[in-house]
Amino acid sequence: MKFNIFTLLTLAFLFCNNNSFAQLKDSLSNKSNRFSVGIQISSFGGDFGWGVHFTSPYFAKKRLAIRLSAQYHYYEHLDSNATETLWTPYPAFKLGFVSTSKVLINFLRLYSHTGALIVVPNTVFSDIPIAFGAYTKLGAEALFSSNGKAWGSYFFEGGWIGLFSKANRLPGNPVYSNGFLAATGVRFYF
C-alpha cells in the first residue's frame, strides 16, 4: 500500500512539474530564437583562434538561422630555415546556416551548423590572396535564464573544417585550417 501511494505522489509531482517545465521550455525557446551575439575561442585543425559571431533571428518554424562569424587564428609552423616555431596570424570568416532543436531538459539545446569559409592567408606562409573552404559542426548550448527568459548561453561545438589551400611558402606545402574543428564560448540574446 505504501508503495502505491508513493508511486501515485511521485507521478503527480512529475506531471505537475512537467507542465511548468514545458512552460519554461517554451519561454526559453522563444527568447533564445532571437538575434544573438557571441564570443568564442576555437581551433581550426590545430590553429588556435578567437572570434565573434552574429546569429539572425530564427525562421522556418524557429528552426533555422543564418550565422556570420569573424575569427582571428594563429598558424603554428616552422620558419623557412626550420629553426624557430612561429605563430602567424590570419583572419577567417564563416557564413552558414544553423539548424536547432527545441529546448531539451529545461535548459539545453542542440544544433548543427554548416557553411562556407573564407580565409585571408598571411603572406608569411602563403602567396594566395583568398582561400575558400567549408565546415560543419554539431553543438550544444546551456541556456542561462532569469524569470523564465533566456538571456544567454554557454556553448561547445565540434566538427570538421576543410580549406582548399596550402601554405605554399613553407617547406613541404603543409595544410592549415584543416581537420577537427572545436569551439566554446558564450552567446547573448537580444
Image (cartoon, rainbow, N blue to C red):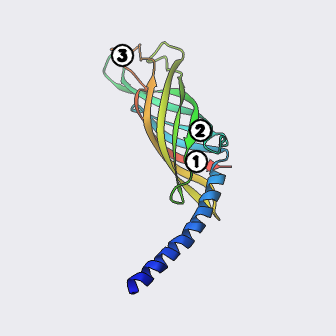
Q: Point out the tag, 1 or 2, that comes first from the N-terminus.
A: 2
Relative to the observer, which residue lies in front, 77 or 97? 97
Residue situated furthest bottom in the rendering? 1
Relative to the observer, which residue lies in front, 64 or 42? 64
The quarter of the rendered structure image containing the N terminus is bottom left
Q: Residue at x 54, y 47 (%)?
A: 101
Q: CA distance from mark 2 to mark 3?
A: 34 Å
Q: Point out the tag, 2 or 3, that comes first from the N-terminus.
A: 2
For label 3, the SS is loop
Q: Which residue has dot 3 on it?
A: 80
The spot of residue 186 in percent (x, y) is: 55, 48
Camera-nearest label, 2 or 3: 2
Disc 2 residue type (three-letter):
His
Q: CA distance from mark 1 to mark 2?
A: 9 Å
Q: Which residue has dot 2 on it?
A: 53
CB atoms at circles 1 and 2 under 8 Å apart?
A: yes
Q: Which mark is drawn over residue 187?
A: 1
The spot of residue 30 in percent (x, y) is: 66, 53
Determine whether, in the image, residue 28 is placed left or right of residue 74. Answer: right
